[in-house]
Image (cartoon, coloured by chain):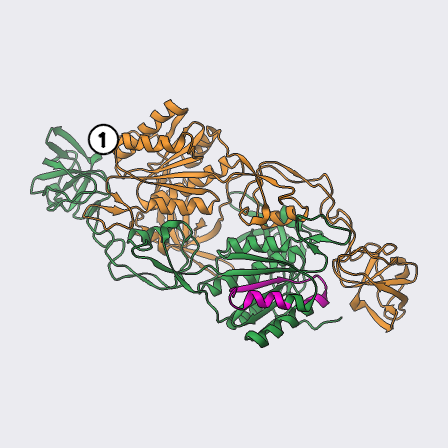
Chain colours: A orange, B green
Amino acid sequence: MAEFFNVLPPAEALARWLEAVTHHTASVETDLRAGMAIGGVLAEEVLSPEDLPAFRRATVDGYAVRAADTYGAGEALPAYLRVVGEVRMGEQPAITVGPGQAALIHTGAMIPDGADAVVMVEHTSLIAVDEIEVLRRVAPGENVLQVGEDVRRGERVLSAGARLRPPEIGALLALGLGTAARPIRLRARPRVAIFSTGDEVIPPEDTPAPGQVRDVNSFTISALAAEAGAIAEPWGIIPDDAAALETALRAALAPPAAADLAVITAGSSVSARDMTAAVINRLAAELGGPGVLVHGVAIKPGKPTILAVVDGRPVLGLPGNPVSAIVAFWLFGLPAIGHVLGGSPPSRPRLRATLTANVPSVAGREDYIPVVLHENDDTIRADPIFGKSNLIFTLVRADGLARIPLDATGLRAGDAVDVYPF
Amino acid sequence: MAEFFNVLPPAEALARWLEAVTHHTASVETDLRAGMAIGGVLAEEVLSPEDLPAFRRATVDGYAVRAADTYGAGEALPAYLRVVGEVRMGEQPAITVGPGQAALIHTGAMIPDGADAVVMVEHTSLIAVDEIEVLRRVAPGENVLQVGEDVRRGERVLSAGARLRPPEIGALLALGLGTAARPIRLRARPRVAIFSTGDEVIPPEDTPAPGQVRDVNSFTISALAAEAGAIAEPWGIIPDDAAALETALRAALAPPAAADLAVITAGSSVSARDMTAAVINRLAAELGGPGVLVHGVAIKPGKPTILAVVDGRPVLGLPGNPVSAIVAFWLFGLPAIGHVLGGSPPSRPRLRATLTANVPSVAGREDYIPVVLHENDDTIRADPIFGKSNLIFTLVRADGLARIPLDATGLRAGDAVDVYPF
C-alpha cells in the first residue's frame, strides 16, 4: 500500500508534462458575429486586408476647412469662411472645399476633397446663414483620422495563438474578417472528458447511504473547464475497478469520441490512485504514449496529482478531495487547455496583497491557502482562513488562494503575498 | 448644435443611475449539473438541509483505532493491535473496533463504531497477517473528519445575491441541492438588447462604400455582456432617425420582448446623441421613467455616456467610437448587469502596477489609458500606449487599462497605478 511519489516542483512538473503534449485541436472556420468566439484562440495569423480607416474621417463635430485658411486666426482676429454645405454621414461628400470655404461635418464623417483639417464647432460662430468666423487656427491634419492610421493594409494585426478578447473581436469585424463571407480560423474548443471515480461516489441527485458521498468533482471541474473556454464532457462515475476505468477512458480517448484532454478525479485512497496510474500506462501502451510522466507534485493541497500523456493528449489525474481537485485542475488543467488550443494559457489574474497573519509552510512545497480579501484604495489585505483545508465550504468562504512560495518555510503577517482570486 | 453636458464623476453617476433601477430579473429553478450555472446569482438564501459530512470520515489511509490504545506508543515502544478487518469504501462498516483492535481504512471511508482516530499507514508496520505495530500515538479525533465539520444542518451556507463560482457549485451539489429533485432558484440571466445607430454604419459582412464603416459595437458589447453572464440580443443597426430608434427601442423594452437592459451605441455626432436622449425620454413618458438621469460623465474616453432608466430598467447610451463604447460599457454596463441580477457587480480584477512613463491628465476627469504589462516576480510595470486613444487596434495591443484618478492632473513615471486587465 505504500507508494513512491515522484514529487516534482509544480513549475517543473507542468513544463515536463506540456513538453510531451503534441496534440492541438483542429482549426475551424468561425463567424465572430455569433458571440461564441470570446476567449477563442486564432489558428492562423491575420494580415489586414485593407486600410482602417478606409477614408479620412472627422474626429469631432465642426467644419472641414483648409488649414491654411485659418493661419493667424484667433479670438481677436477671426478667419471668415463661407459654408458651402454639410457632409452627410455615411456618404462620399458631393462637395469640395475650396480656398475660403468650409463644410459642416459630424464626428466620423468623411473629409471632403480640398479640406485637410476640422475646426471644432466650439471654436466657430455662425454669423450668417452661410458664413462662419473661426476663432482658433488649426494645423493640417488636426481633428482628422488619416487613411490607415489605425491599421495598414497588409500589416500583421494578430498572431496565431492570440486569444480573442472584446477588442480583438471588434478589430477583426472592423476589417470585415470573421463573417460568413470571410471567416476566421480559430482552434476548436477543447473537449474535456471528465471522470469521477470511487466506490463511495454517487450522483448528486441521489441520497447517500452511510459511507457514500455525492459526486462534486465532475461539476466543479466542468465549471472550471467551461470558464477556460473548453467544452466539458462529464462521463459520470466509475467504480474503483481497473477494468471499468480502462474501458471508459479508452472510449473517451480513442476515436470516435477522441477527447482532447481527459481528467480523472481519482478515488481518495493511495491504492485507487495507483490503479489510475496503471490504467493510464496500459492505455498509453495501446493508443500511444508516453503515459504517466509525473506522479506527485510538491503542492498542498493537490500533492497526489498525476500528469500523463496518452496519444499526445494530456491526461490529468486529480486527487479525489474536492478542494484538492479544484486547486490541481486550476494549476495544471487550465494551462493544458491553453496548450491544446495552441495559445498561451488563459491569464490567471493575480493580486499582490498583504498577509494579516502568519502562515506556516514547509520549504520545498508550494502551498495554496484560502484567503478573504479586504480592499481599500491603496492596499489589499489577505486574511488566511485556517482550519482543515480540504473542506469545500472553506473555499466558499474564500475570495481567492494565496500562494506560499516553494522555498519559503511560511510567511509572516505583513509580508506581501500573491493572491489568485477565483 | 452645442450641448449642455451634465458631466458627473463616474462613481456618482453610477450610484445615481443604479439607485433608480428597480427592475430585477425573475428567479428560475436551475439544475446546477447542466454546467450553465457558473457565474449565476442566487435568488434566495440557502440553508443546509443536512450535515456535511454525514458520517465520520478518514482523512488518510491507515488504521481506524481507539486513540487510548496508542497512548505512549512510539518508535521505541510500539503499541500492538489486532487487525479485525478492512472498511470498504462506500459502505457502512460491518465491523466494530474494540479495545486492542484496528481496522484497515482508506481515505474518505466511514470510521467504524468503536474507533475514534486513524493512524497513518506510514506510522504502522504489519508484523503478522492480522497484527500491526503502531509507531506513533494518535489523539482522539486525529485524522477523522467529524459529522457536520464542513457545514451543519440548518446553517446558512449562501446568501441571496451570492455569485456561483466553482466552489459554490460543488458545495451545493455536495448537499444534494441544485439537482432536478431539489432545484436551486437563480436569477435569470439578464437579456441585453443592443442597438448600433448611425447612418454611416453597415453590417460587418458588407463592403463599405466611401464614408461607411462596419458595425463593431454590436459585437464588442455582446462579448462583454456575455462574459458578465448576460444574454446579448443584438437588434441590429438603426439609422440616425428618431422615429426608427423609438420604434426599435419600444419593441425591445415593452412586452413581449421586455429586455432587462438596453444599450444604444449612439451615432458619433452630438446631434445623434441628443436624439438618443430625446427618444429615451419620450419612451420613459410612455412606459415609465424616470428617463435620462445623467448625460455626460467625467471620464476619458467615454464622456458622452447617457445613463437612463425606462420602466425601472437600465438604458445605457454609449459613445459611437468603439474604444469609448468598450470603456463606458465596462464601467457602467457591467455593474448594471450585476444590479438587475440582484447581486454584487461581477468583480473587476485589479492589479497594482508601476507606471513607466508620465501620463498627463486633467483634474476632475478619470482617464483610462491602454497599457502593456510586464510582470516579474515582485513588480508589474505598466507601459502606457500613447497616440490616438480612440483606435481599436490600440486596445488590441494593450493588456489592460490604467486608471488615472479623478483628482490627479496626471501621473508620473514610477507612480503606482491601478490597472484593469481585459
Is residue B7 visible in the rendered image? The answer is no
Residue at disc 1, secondary structure: loop
Judge by depth and name the residue closer to the eye, A276 or B123.
A276
Horizontally, is A241 left or right of B290 in the view?
A: left
Residue B298 falls in which quadrant of the image? bottom right
Horizontally, is B308 left or right of A57 in the view?
A: left
Residue projecting furthest to the front:
B256
Q: Position of residue B351 (x, y in %)?
A: 53, 52
Q: Position of residue A218 (x, y in %)?
A: 35, 44
Query: Where's the N terminus of chain A, which quadrant?
Result: top left
Which residue is depicted at the point 81% across and 67% down? A123
Which residue is depicted at the point 48% across and 44% down? A229
Which residue is depicted at the point 74% across and 60% down? A107
Q: Position of residue A173 (x, y in %)?
A: 64, 48
Q: Which residues are magenta?
A: B246-273
Relative height, residue A246 to residue B319 (above, below): above
Residue B123 falls in which quadrant of the image? top left
Q: Which residue is mark 1?
A: A1
Relative height, residue A55 to residue B42 (above, below): above
Query: Quick check: is B266 in the magenta stretch?
Result: yes
Is residue A373 visible in the rendered image? The answer is yes
Residue projecting furthest to the right:
A99
Count of numbered labels shown in the rendering: 1
Judge by depth and name the residue closer to the eye, B322 or A368.
B322
Callout 1 amino acid:
Met
Q: Position of residue B200 (x, y in %)?
A: 72, 57
Residue projecting furthest to the left:
B99
- Mark 1, residues whose alpha carbon is within 10 Å: few (<14), some, or many (≥20)? few
Residue projecting furthest to the top:
A285
- The subunit carrying tag 1 is A
Query: Quick check: is B74 in the magenta stretch?
Result: no
